[in-house]
Image: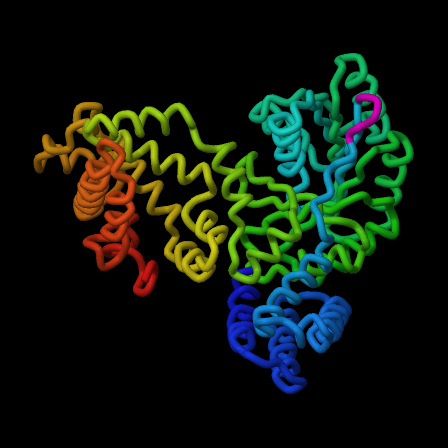
Amino acid sequence: MFENLSERLSRSLKKISGKARLNHDNIQDALRDVRKALLEADVALSVVKEFTTQVRKRAQGVEVSRALNPGQQFLKIVETELVEVMGVTNEKLSLAQQAPAIILMAGLQGAGKTTTVAKLAKFLQDKEKKKVMVVSADVYRPAAIKQLERLAEEVEAEFFPSAADQDPIDIAKNAVAHAKKTHCDVLIVDTAGRLHIDEQLMGEIQGLHKAVSPVETLFVIDAMIGQDAVNTAKAFNEALPLTGVVLTKTDGDARGGAALSVRQVTGKPIKFLGSGETVDGLEPFHPERIASRILGMGDIMTLIEEAEQKIDKVKAEKLVEKVQKGKRFDLEDLRDQLQQLQNMGGMGSMLEKLPGMGNLAQMAEQADMGKQFKQMDAIINSMTPQERRNPDVLNGSRKRRITVGSGTQIQDLNRLLKQHKQMSKMMKKMKGGGMQRMMRGLGGMMPGGGGGMPPVGGGGLPPGLGR
């Protein structure tokens, strides 16, 4: 998300950030570029006008004229105003009330409401240690009820059954009663969506809201529909007392206009960003971190939080212990590392959170590294335990068996073995704690260092990636 906007803004702001002095002309030039970048990112026109007006006022004020580095100060102003537009701080869910706290989910069909219900249930269980129940009041799409039941089982949340021949309000009331009886902390109610806003949809969800009096009414919206996302949010906000917004499919939206517009247009905070189909693809929306990402300054805090949550610490400690004792780094270890990386959202997701790595992240996504990691995983899984522990035993017939089993080519296997050998050499440098030597060895893992990691296409990363 934000790749296009980030690239355009970075180019625009680079011109002015090196200026020793700012004047009316170079401020105007920079703001013209910023305005164009925001409009191309599908940010609402009213938001763009307000944003550029505020930046201009502050850039021409005392704080810049007296600054030691006016160009850098201008960049700081842009960052501060981006944060302001998106809501200043992360606004948490208001769950401090008599259980069960009811969360009503609203939105159009196809926005990812049902998947978001499961993601939110998992988030509240894992992060807030809540006992969560979910229920579907979508009686128009029977598959929605089955889908939520399957997802509830996956995230180990309580599921309250419902059927297509029931009244949505009766379903919700019965679910509330059952949640009280079973001492659930939170009840999340999934509602029906439509392909467009209509009176029937609004009337039904208003009735549901009145019947259960939710503490949170979250509007779930597809970030990829850009400007339409803002208009739809506005319509729902007029019909319902929304308390917040969840932006979904953010991994498929390179513009980010919705994220920069929704708060300003509706007055309601974005509380979560959803990405991917997996149930752990939900993160709290932190305006200051997102602004930092947009300006190419990374998001180290989110990366650390994801690492703490998703990395298998036991496996990581075992690998460190193994390497420090000088034992061999085998293909089972490599597979574990690939799985850990995938758990973190893949290489692109990690790179975009590192300062100055925005373009690299974009290239990683274009190169489809996720597909390459899956291919490597399939190759390693097609080996016997002996072959994974000692790749030197791999002869021609073994290699043919592995490639047939994994649906890959001999050159894919050979490339994997070459990269494993590079990692093994690097790991040997860590024996006894040679961390600095290991970091120098990382150069060999990038293009130009002898093969590239991970494999992409015909060999290594795309030209320019990592240089």
Residue 173 to residue 295: above or below: above
Tell which residue pokes out farthest to the bottom in this image: 25
Residue 409 in view in this figure = no
Q: Residue at 60% across / 29% down in the picture?
A: 151
Q: Residue at 40% across / 35% down in the picture?
A: 340
* Residue 180, x across and y down, in percent: 81, 16
* Residue 316, x across and y down, in percent: 37, 29
What scheme was used to colour the molecule? rainbow
Placement of the C terminus among the 4 image quadrants: bottom left
Residue 177 in view in this figure = yes
Q: How many marks?
A: 0
* Residue 7, x across and y down, in percent: 51, 67
Tell which residue pokes out farthest to the top in this image: 181
Q: Quadrant of residue 261?
A: bottom right
**359 sits left or right of 338 in the view:** right
Q: Residue at 34% across / 60% down in the picture?
A: 465
Residue 48 to residue 139: above or below: below
- Between 421 and 339, which is closer to the camera in this rendering? 421
Extent of the magenta region: 95-99
